[in-house]
Image (cartoon, rainbow, N blue to C red):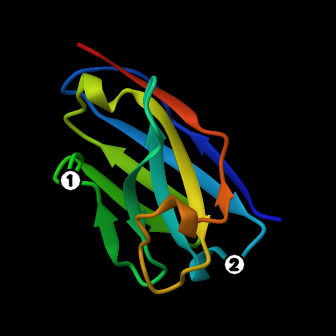
Amino acid sequence: QVQLVESGGGLVQAGGSLRLSCAASGRTFSNAAMGWFRQGPGQEREFVAAMASTGGTSYADSVKGRFTISRDNAKNTVYLEMNRVQPEDTAVYYCAQSPAKYSAPTSATLYSDWGQGTQVTVSS
């Protein structure tokens, strides 16, 4: 059974930076695609970023150029580096794992396992 545990959330001022981490266990991490999604207050869950097992990436237009996804297969961990954050980035951020090995899926339906989420709050 796959377990995903996010960390690194918190309160940050607009224009600042934050790095989220997600530690995975239970499936061969290196063969899985990893993604980050978020859900803001009163909003639906939306795609943020994803990375294929081969290293290819996908980003939502709203975060492109500001956020960077990376992974360390030796540590079974995926990261989301968030720079120049804005109040609209306030959300619960979820890590997810997909068995889609060679792609970086943007649809939540392609992810089979999810973490519990970590809150990110950006103050203006």
**Figure disc tally:** 2
Position above or below: 5 against 13: below
> What's the residue at 43%, 81% (across, down)?
103
Q: Position of residue 9 (x, y in %)?
A: 49, 31
Q: Is residue 66 left or right of residue 78?
A: left
Residue 55 occupies quadrant: bottom left
Side of 83 relative to 70 (left or right): left
Out of 86 and 77, give the one closest to the viewer: 86
The extreme right residue here reads 1
Badge 1 vs badge 2, beta-carbon distance below 8 Å: no
Q: Earlier in the sequence, mark 1 or mark 2?
A: 2
Identify residue for label 1. Answer: 61
Percent coordinates x, y for residue 82 in the rendering: 31, 42
Q: Which mark is residue 28?
A: 2
The amino acid at mark 2 is Thr
Q: Tell me where residue 91 appears, x and y as whole percent.
A: 43, 30
- Whether residue 4 is visible, yes or no, is yes
Up the image or down, 37 lies above or below 116; here it is below
> Helix, strand, or loop for circle 1?
loop
Quarter of the figure that contains the N terminus: bottom right
Residue at x 44% of width, y 77% of height: 52
